[in-house]
Every structure is written in C-alpha cells, then in structure tokens.
Image (spheres, rainbow, N blue to C red):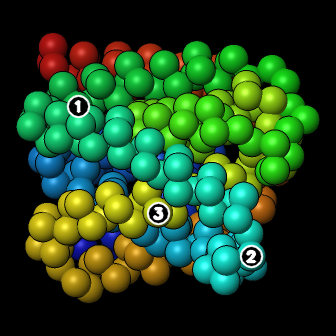
Amino acid sequence: MDIIQAIILGIIQGIFEWLPISSEGQSMLILINAFQMDVDEALSVAIFMHLGTSFAVMIKFRKEFKSIISGKNHELTRIIVISTVCTGLTGLPLYFILKSTFTGGIAASLLIGVLLILTGIILGLNKGKGHKSMESVSLFDMIILGLVQGFAILPGVSRSGVTLTTLLLRNVEQKTALVISFLISVPVVLGAVALDAGMILTFDPVLGLVMFLSSLFVGYLMMDFLLQFADRVNFSIFCIFLGVLTIIMTAGYYVL
C-alpha cells in the first residue's frame, strides 16, 4: 500500500461510515480484491480506519462527551456503559471466529455479500420514527442495542444501520436514536483497536497516520451532509443490490 491508496481508503471510510452500507465491508472488499491483501490484515486495516471517524464523532459531539466525563449526564453514561458491555458479549466471540475462520479472500467476499443482503433486510424493518426520549430508554433497550451492535464486527453488517434500526424499532425518537448510535460507537471502536493492537502496530506508521487523518478530516466534513442524504435514499434496496453484486462478482472470479 502506498500513500495515495492510504488516502483513498481514508476517504472511503470517512464517507461510508455515516451510510448504512458497512464501511468495514466496503473497505475489506477493496483491500482483498484490489490490493490483494490477506483477510486477517484487511480486517485489521478496516478496524483501524474506524479510529479516524471515531475521533470525528468525539469532536462533533464534544459537548455530550464533556457532560459524560464531568458526570452531569447520567442517562447517556448509563446507555453507553451498558450497551458497550453487551456489545462485547457478541462482538468478542465473533471477532475471534473471523480471525480464525476466514483466511481466504473468496470466502470473506462471499460472507460480506451475504451480510450486506442481511443488512438490507434489517434496514427494511425500519418503519417508524419512535417517541422515546433519552430518559425513556430502558435497560432492556440498552441490552438489545449492545448485543446487536456486536454483530457489526462482521464485515457487511452496518453498525450504524442495525443500531439505528434497533433503536427505532424500540420506539426511540429518531434524532435521539441517531445521537445514541453515534456515541456508543466510540468505546467499541477504541476497544476493537486495542484488541487488534498486535496487528495494527505492524502497520507502516506513515501510512497509518495518513489513513487516520484522511478518515478523520473527510468523516467530520461529510457527517452532516451524508446524514441528510441518507434520509432520501432507500438503503435497504441498495444494500441488497450491493450484496447480490458482490456475490455474483466473487463467484464469477472464482469460476474464471
């Protein structure tokens, strides 16, 4: 990988992170099929690139994080802590399964295609906008939210898509659901980067810094624009289309 490729990957992460089409899945497809990277390394790069967009979230929602650190926002703190713990219950086993099972690029690409289709089906369940406020989010809501978020470690499952859909299905008000979905991503990403630190520390530091800065810069600039754009697009159909296309192209490559 060179600096230009690192910048391109950061731009892709900065754009796709806010859209429910799995930025991790898209990055891994590029890394595996275009950059000829092995699955294990591709997963580590995809995880690392979330660090830049997580910092973009921390900058964008700095007031909320400040209120959490100062101990003034007990409700939000409770949501983040409980959902993060529950995310570990599903995310950790799946992480180790991924690392030990999918070593071939074809199998990984097919998995991403199938999970993109599944994400599209889940997004299609999103029918309502809800009415619950931050204070009305129940313990059961937080547990379900965290368990569902853990599945986003699988490339092809959109973290933002499944968490937002889960919150809306639990009747949480749309704007509140969006804020919660953003904020709960930060500790999970930091945890995933720490868990994968052994592999990440082998990256070229210059390329790592370039990926981080480009995903942070583009992610922060594009956040509001893409969230408004997302309201006008049926990502359920789009995810299913991407999934089917990925499977067809992967199967065609294998046959040829």
User: From mark 2 to mark 3, how far is it between C-alphas?
Assistant: 19 Å
Q: Is residue 195 above or below residue 213?
A: above
What residue is at 62 percent from the left and 32 percent from the top? 140
Crowding near the residue tagged with mark 3, few <14, some 14–19, many ≥20 C-alpha atoms within 10 Å: some
- Disc number lying in front (2 or 1): 2
Callout 2 environment at 10 Å: few (<14), some (14 to 19), or many (20+)? few
Please state the horizontal and vertical placement of residue 91, each as a whole percent of the image.
34, 41
Gap in angstroms between the C-alphas marked 3 and 1: 26 Å
Query: Horizontal and vertical percent for residue 178?
Result: 74, 49
Q: Earlier in the sequence, mark 3 or mark 1?
A: 1
Of label 2 and label 3, which has the lower sequence position? 2
> Would you name the residue on which mark 3 appears?
187
The residue lying toward the viewer, choosing from 142 and 103, is 142
The answer for how far apart the CA atoms under marks 2 and 1 are is 44 Å
Q: Secondary structure at mark 2?
A: loop
Q: List the residue tagged with mark 2.
A: 72
Label at residue 108: 1
